[in-house]
Amino acid sequence: MRSFKPSIESLEALPILDRVKLDARRTAVIVVDMQNEFANPKGKLYLPSTQQIIHSIRSLLSKARQKKATIVYTMDTHYPDDLEFKDWGQHAMKNSWGWRIIDELKPEHDDIVVEKSRFDAFYNTMLDDILRTRGIENLVIVGTVANICVLATIAGAYMRGYRVYVPINAVAYIDELSLYIALYQASKVYRATLVEKAENVEFE
């Protein structure tokens, strides 16, 4: 069997905007799977880089709420004997501690919560209907993890005609290579706009 190992030095630089301003009435912030299972040190699939993005997500949500932008939280949600457990082990069981969103990012009264059973938040959920009912055209997608649920949700958004913005410092990752691959796919294939910081996303 042959193997393939890319050279990090050969990887293409990606275009990143310093800042962006979006119409709050047409924009939703999608917070992907910031649950105890993934973003709390006691979680079964804890990812340390989630700790680095909490502040940036909170800053983004604060600005979005001030301008009345739509905020959606996705929750990885599973039941006994889920097929996904063969690959990842049992996790994010409905109503368990690991399933709950971390305390630092608790949804507020007007926020929307969408439960999903697969990587893509649009798959077999009402997310698309919710967004279209509100006249949403732009999605700012943040959360965990870059090359799995975040990328799958970006792909789902692209397939449905949404414009996607990804603040890089608000996306958790396994390692730098997987982050790069996710951002490359998001930018080159799914035409997402990469933004340097969540703090530089403005709403009007």
Image: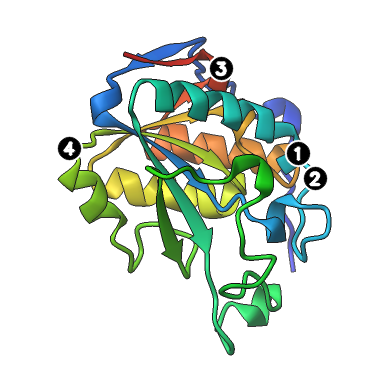
Does dot 3 land on a helix, a strand or a loop? helix
Given residues 18 and 40, the one toward you in this image is: 40
Q: Which residue does the image show at 74% across and 26% down from the upper left?
A: 9
Label 3 Cα crowd, 10 Å radius (few <14 / some 14-19 / many 20+): many
Label 1 Cα crowd, 10 Å radius (few <14 / some 14-19 / many 20+): few
Does dot 2 land on a helix, a strand or a loop? loop
Label 3 vs 1, first from the N-terminus = 1
Do residues under tags 3 and 4 come within 8 Å of each other at their CB atoms? no
The amino acid type, in three-letter code, at marker 4 is Gly
Q: Which residue is disc 3 drawn over?
A: 199
Q: Which residue does the image show at 57% across and 46% down from the upper left?
A: 106
Q: Which residue is disc 2 drawn over?
A: 48
Q: Which residue is disc 1 drawn over?
A: 51
Residue 46 spot, x, y in % from top left: 77, 56
Q: CA distance from mark 3 to mark 4?
A: 24 Å
Q: For the N terminus, which image quadrant?
A: bottom right
Q: Which residue does the image show at 62% across and 65% down from the upper left?
A: 99
Q: Which residue does the image show at 69% across and 65% down from the upper left?
A: 98
Residue 174 spot, x, y in % from top left: 73, 47
The amino acid type, in three-letter code, at marker 2 is Pro
24 relative position to 63: left or right: left
Do residues under tags 3 and 2 come within 8 Å of each other at their CB atoms? no
Question: What is the number of the mark on residue 135?
Answer: 4
Do residues under tags 1 and 2 come within 8 Å of each other at their CB atoms? yes
Query: Visible in this render: residue 163?
Result: yes
Label 2 Cα crowd, 10 Å radius (few <14 / some 14-19 / many 20+): some
Which residue sits furthest front? 109
Q: Nearer the viewer, mark 4 or mark 2?
A: 4
